[in-house]
Image (tube, coloured by chain):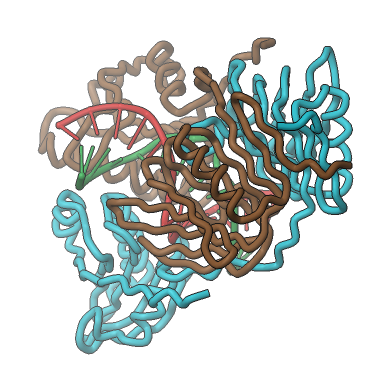
Chain colours: A cyan, B brown, C green, D red
DNA sequence: CAATAGATGTCGTTC
DNA sequence: GAACGACGTCTATTG
């Protein structure tokens, strides 16, 4: 239990229940230094841009990142209630006893204004972090697996092109079957739904149109670990096929 | 500049550069009290579930929310590099001089482990916030506008059903035109792309199939503020129509 | 609980 | 910068 409400070191600064003007100083310092800034307090939030919103007064956590990102988090949900993405410009000013943080985006034009009437904490941190996430189990890795082991689709399938661009979209994997038919494969890393079927249909139709009446047909294959009932029904009505592909994850290495 | 590194009040607690065991205490206290917990420090993060990932050592901001949400934020990007959604169960333990936070999800089974080797700050806050976001400019509001003012689609259009469920998906707005044709409208709040066209095509095909060879045809209309070139081309090839609908936002009230 | 589709989606990639 | 599609998407809604 302490009266001390100000902690400062070379790489960070923390203020407990700061005055508006002290808070303004720390936020501005953090913006200048390209720190990550964390605020906790009572605020209202207004947004105007692609849509518009009003968030009445309540206590939230606000994060400002050096890349221009702004996040306003309520006490629930994974998603920020309001935000601005990387590339925005933030500024802070003390006005009418409030700390007002404004973030501006250009193209599309958007403005986010956070007005704090009271703050429990204001802090800034110089974070160093050169590491990136290593992620396993993505769709593109599924495609790789099939290219290495095409018989998982069917005996005799020969992959030709990954990420084939057509006029109406990108085909995940394009190849031929034993009979010389063209095979279009759409992958889904999770359960495939109606949208996946529509997507596949679009590619198959496009390829049929492009190829015209050549020797051999065009088959459409949806490759996924599972598929919804109605998606499977639609798929069959459209003359398309489903191939069950189990997703395999590598063991997590001890780090 | 102070030696004191601990601040505690009724509704929150902040520790600066705490020991692992002190940090553990505060995090556990915060979990018990259903506080929002904010940690800043050096950590590695492992995730295993629908996919898996490894994030090597670096300094990040971690938030634990009382609904079970966990967020790990790097110094860039709007998205957390790792996370767990609401409904998960978190725990903390000091082990080998590290503070390890584990978050577990059931269905789908997922585990997130954050291992801090050093902490700049650990804090917990009891946030009260009963307010919800008021959002304007959503797709469903676009539909409302058209229901009130159907001539924005075309003279004589009569809306019948919003959110009509068919076997193969939900139609945004279903109605009839002056000639008695069925009209299926798909709305997009932003620029419409190929996916929107495929979606509309699916609904139109379904309705045609359901209706069989009745009097009057089925028209498909894509209503959006803009449309990509290839989407428009595909739309026309499929015999569908585009109607430009300007999105209108209410003026932001001063709050 | 599963399924469906929207989102101020965000993000990466390619043209 | 536009377009296209994935995402550990998340989230709301409805059967």
Q: Residue at x 48, y 52 (%)?
A: B92
Frontmost residue, A8 versus A147: A8
Picture quadrant where residue A96 is located: top right
Picture quadrant where residue A190 is located: bottom left
Instruction: Describe residue A24's horizontal placement relative to residue A140 as left or right.
Output: right
Frontmost residue, A76 versus A111: A76
Is residue A168 among the parts visible in the rendering? Answer: no
Q: Residue at x 82, y 14 (%)?
A: A97
Is residue B13 among the parts visible in the rendering? Answer: yes
Q: Residue at x 52, y 63 (%)?
A: B95
Frontmost residue, A162 versus A13: A13
Residue B87: x and y in percent read 36, 41
A158 to B162, vertically: above or below: below
B126 to A178, vertically: above or below: above
Instruction: Describe residue A177's horizontal placement relative to residue A15 as left or right.
Output: left
Residue B17: x and y in percent read 72, 51
Instruction: Describe residue A14's horizontal placement relative to residue B168 as left or right.
Output: right
Residue A51: x and y in percent read 58, 27
Q: Residue at x 28, y 51 (%)?
A: B107
């Amino acid at each position: 239990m302490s009266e001390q409400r100000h902690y400062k070191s070379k790489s960070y600064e923390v203020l407990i229940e700061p005055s508006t003007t002290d808070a303004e100083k720390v936020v501005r310092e953090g913006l200048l230094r390209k720190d990550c800034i964390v605020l906790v307090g009572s605020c209202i939030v207004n947004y105007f841009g692609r849509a518009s919103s009003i968030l009445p007064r309540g206590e939230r956590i606000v994060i400002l990142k050096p890349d221009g990102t702004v996040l306003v988090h309520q006490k629930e949900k994974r998603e920020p209630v309001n935000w601005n993405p990387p590339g925005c410009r933030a500024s802070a000013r003390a006005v009418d006893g409030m700390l007002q943080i404004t973030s501006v985006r250009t193209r599309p034009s958007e403005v986010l204004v956070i007005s704090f009437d009271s703050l429990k904490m204001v802090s800034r941190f110089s974070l160093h972090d050169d590491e990136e996430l290593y992620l396993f189990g993505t769709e593109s890795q599924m495609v790789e697996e099939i290219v290495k082991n095409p018989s998982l689709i069917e005996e005799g399938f020969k992959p030709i092109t990954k990420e084939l661009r057509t006029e109406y979209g990108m085909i995940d994997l394009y190849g031929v079957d034993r009979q010389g038919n063209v095979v279009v494969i759409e992958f889904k890393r999770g359960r495939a739904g109606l949208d996946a079927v529509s997507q596949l249909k679009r590619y198959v139709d496009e390829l049929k149109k492009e190829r015209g009446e050549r020797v051999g047909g065009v088959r459409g294959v949806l490759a996924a670990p599972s598929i919804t009932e109605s998606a499977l029904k639609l798929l069959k009505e459209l003359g398309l096929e489903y191939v069950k592909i189990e997703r395999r994850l590598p063991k997590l290495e001890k780090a």
